[in-house]
Image (cartoon, helix red, strand yellow):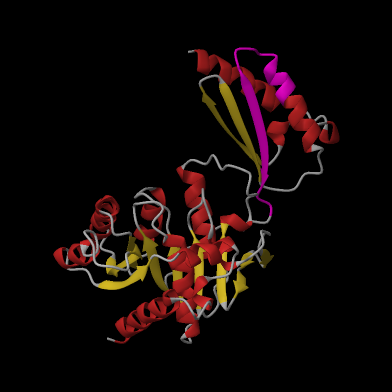
Amino acid sequence: MLNFNLKKKYLSVLSNYSPKEIAPKKLSDLNLKIIDQIIKKDLSITIELYQEYDLDWNRTIAELTSGIETIGKLKKVNIIVTHHKSQPKPLKQNKKQFNHKLILVCSAKGGVGKSTICVNLALALNMLGKKTAIIDSDIYGPSTHHLLGISKAEPKVKDGIMMPYEKHGVKLNSMGLIVPEDKALMWRAPMLTKSLNNLLYSTDWGDTEYLFVDLPPGTGDVYLTLLKNHPNAEAILISTPQKISLIDVSRSIDLLKKLDIGILGIIENMAYKENGPMSEHVTNFAKERNIKHLGKILYDDNIAYYSDISEPAILQKKLNFSNELKKIAKLLMHNDNV
């Protein structure tokens, strides 16, 4: 009951607030959406704008915060404003127009190097003459733009369609290019789904042949949104040699099978150079589940170094990493020709 009464009071402050620039209109008259959440006694409010308003938002946020704080019973009030004026509405799903081969790079386990493999594999195929692109569907923690060396800036929009950025011949669209690095997204599933659909359908992918999707850890809303609309998508699994990683990969396999998504194979990342107690874990795992073992990427701290400075490791010909990724890329091309 406490939160309910609080909610009524602070929503009343918000809806009845009249910015000086548009008085006597109220905040509730504008084209916006308010997302609110109370955790213990901390209140977070996101005001999502769907068109541009010439308001002093710093003053507006300060006055709203002051007004809500007078209610009492709250430790902290945090209000942020997000602008969606440049994001087009999702296109209607038209599978005849979506002719790219969709490859999902996934693992329910975090920290196994999905993004690094995704970016460099797309580059490997591009080096072999294929036109490739990437969607970073890790809405909460995007990183592919950094790995490719693309500075943060909103994509240009032409006729309601976003123009992807291009670097090293690979196209990219990502929420990481739109949301400031120091801002946390507090979105529920509907907003996440809408954003992912925008990345997929409201981006001009042109003559892309292979569209890679860098998936977040887990088996949640992003997977379900993506996979239910693309039954012809295929997946590449990423795992480190540890069994704790393979346990989570098993969950990804279970989800993919339930959704009838084909599995191209598994890539062993950060593998050991010498034979040891874990050197055959991924190989045996693949055999037991009748999944192709696509390749083994040896652990090399140079990969992390070049990723950190936004220079894709595959461009460093001296690294074993470059040769292995190209071998895997050739396997994918061969698979298409079978």
Is residue 27 shown above or below 149?
above
Quadrant of the snapshot with the C terminus: bottom left
Determine if the magenta segment contains residue 71: yes
Q: Position of residue 43 (x, y in %)?
A: 59, 25
- Which residue is farthest right? 21
Compared to residue 92, the image places residue 293 above or below, namely below
**In this rendering, would 328 be left or right of 184?**
left
Find residue 202 and report its horizontal and vertical position in percent. Answer: 56, 64
Of 62 and 85, the residue lying toward us:
62
Asked whether 241 or 21 is in front, the reply is: 241
Decide if residue 36 is on the left or right side of residue 256. right
Residue 29, visible in the rendered structure:
yes
Left/right of residue 20 with respect to residue 78 in the rendered view: right
Q: Please state which of residues 285 and 129 is positioned toward the viewer in this rendering.
A: 285
Q: Residue at x 49, y 48 (%)?
A: 192
Question: Foreground: 276 or 101?
Answer: 276
Is 67 included in the stretch rendered in magenta? yes
Q: Is residue 202 visible?
A: no
Quadrant of residue 143 in the image?
bottom right
Name the spot of residue 70 as percent of width and height, x first.
70, 14
The location of residue 204, given as percent across then percent down, is 57, 71
For the point 61% across and 73% down, the residue is 166
Instruction: Count every numbered label the image shows and give the total.
Output: 0
Q: Is residue 294 above or below residue 256?
A: below
Residue positioned most to the left:
288
Q: Quadrant of residue 28?
A: top right
Per the rendered image, the range of residues in magenta is 65-85
Instruction: Name which residue lies at 24% across and 67% down.
Output: 275
Q: Is residue 235 above or below residue 19?
A: below
